[in-house]
Each structure stands twice: as C-alpha cells, then as structure tokens.
Amino acid sequence: MEKAPLISVILPVYNGGPFLRETLEALLGQSLGDFELIIINDGSTDDSEAIILSFSDPRIRYLPQTNQGFIASLNRGIAVAKGKYIARIDADDVCLPDRFAQQASLLNDRPHVSVVGCFITFIDENGKETGIWPEDRATVTNKDIRRALPHFNCIAHPGVMARAEVFREYPYRASQKHIEDYDLWLRLAGDGKVMEKLPVPLLLYRVHSGSVTVSVIKKNNIFLRHFHCKRRYLALRISQGKWSMFDFHVLMGMCGDAVTAMVKSIKSRRNV
C-alpha cells in the first residue's frame, strides 16, 4: 500500500502563468519534501497548463477542470487530499524553504492546535519586497488572534497549514466569495478551535494588478464587505443554535463596520 504523504498542498490556479513557475519551484524546493502538491487548474486560458506539465515531479497531482471558481477548487482539493495536514498556497505567492518543516513541526508538537499560520512579506510583480502587514505581525498567539478577528482579518490565507480533518469539517462557503478565508477563521474561532502563528516570515505574498487583493477587495469598501461577512457568519451561528461571547464581539465588530462603511460611502459621494 502506498504511504500517504504528511502534507497535502492545495494550489488552485486560474490564469496564473506570469508567476506560476516561481511558485512551483519554491514549493518543490521545500526542505521538508513529504507532501503531495494538488494543482487544480480552474479552466485557465493562458499558459498555466503548459507550465504545470513542464514539471515532472511525482509529488504533483494535476486536476484540470472547467472554470468553477476559487471556492469550489479549494473544496475539491480538500476532498481528494491524502495528507495528515493540508497547506494552502496561491499561484502568485512564494514559500520560503522551511515553511512546511516549521509548520508541520508545530502541529506535531502541539496536538491542540488546529491551524498554524506564519508572517508574510509583501512583494510586487518583480519580486521586490514592499512591506509587511501590521495586523499580521501583531497577532501570534491564539489569544491575540481571537481578540482581533471580531474586528478584522489577521491571518494570511495562502500561508496556513491545518489538520486535514479541520478543513473537512469546515468547508469553504460559496456565500462568502472573496472573503471565504475570513469566514473560515470566524467559524473556527467561534467553535473554540486553536489558531496560532509562527512569528517568522515564511511566505512572500505578491500584490499586483491582477491579484484579488487589488482587483476586488481594495476597489470596494472593505468595511462593507466585512459587515456582510460577519452578518452571514452570525446568521449561520444562530441557525446552528450556537452563541458565545466571541460571537457577541463579532456582533459589536459588525456594528462598527456598518458605521465606518456608511461614513466612507458618504465621504466618497461628496468627493465625486
């Protein structure tokens, strides 16, 4: 019987050609090599497939499909993953060499931890470092993260590793498109799951004109998006008959988002 890998890496790809080769080379060069790399090509129309097929590493599991979207791709990857742990990465980001080794070591040593993230460093189209995410660096412990999440997202999605059973118990929700990671962290925290970070930068997070960070989130009122994310999260909690002090803090954060979103909307109209 074939031995299951320690880690399943889930990499959704949609027209990721410009940066995909660098992403794959960094993944395949990890110091901990006991993983499978599940690449879901979500109907790309550029040269993504040619780049993927140019790699012959046996750890790669290539799953092409018609375009179904990011969330469907993630959930498909989770469904077929064979590893004890599941790691996330996007097609334009770069893992530093010891990321998998350090995250897997923490999960091995701390069985109570469900998800482990890491610090990120922003890079541009040319790979030049452009700064850090202050909210990321300010939240390391589970206590830090639980305190912050009712107000803002503080965990970089492509930099996490989690126990496979956690991802299977908490699939991504289609109703939370473009903010599916924040919704996931809220659901995990609401149920008391422990999330921590390694306080070291292990991921280069690329921000460019075609990234979701720029093309969707920054072009919209982020506070309004957070309001709707929290509203849908709280509606789910109520439908499940769940409520906790954490949810009360999320409710307060949602109200704050509503006020800030309204103020920003009024200011933007005045500036037109």
Image (cartoon, helix red, strand yellow):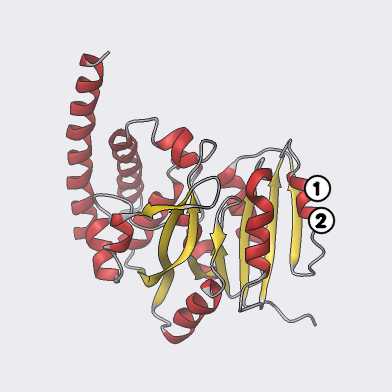
> Disc 1 on helix, strand or loop?
helix
Residue 202 horizontal/vertical position (percent): 47, 67
- Indicate whether 161 appears above or below 53: below
Query: The C terminus is located in which quarter?
Result: top left
> Disc 2 on helix, strand or loop?
loop
Q: In which image quadrant can residue 263 be found?
A: top left
Could you tell me the amino acid type at mark 2?
A: Ser
- Evaluate if marks 2 and 1 touch, with contact meaning CB atoms under 8 Å apart: yes
Q: Residue at x 61, y 79 (%)?
A: 32
How crowded pointer 1 is (Cα within 10 Å; few <14, some 14-19, many 20+) is rated as few
Query: The N terminus is located in which quarter?
Result: bottom right
Residue 180 horizontal/vertical position (percent): 45, 47
| Res 73 visible | yes
Is 255 left or right of 200, judged from the image as shown? Answer: left
Marking on residue 68: none
Instruction: Identify the residue position indicated by label 2 in the image.
Output: 54
Q: Residue at x 63, y 57 (%)?
A: 23
How crowded pointer 2 is (Cα within 10 Å; few <14, some 14-19, many 20+) is rated as few
In this view of the protein, which residue sits in the foreground, 245 or 138? Answer: 138
| Res 244 visible | no
Could you tell me the amino acid type at mark 1?
A: Ala
Is 210 left or right of 37, judged from the image as shown? Answer: left
Give the alpha-carbon distance from disc 2 to disc 1, as whole Å.
6 Å
Instruction: Identify the residue position indicated by label 1 in the image.
Output: 50
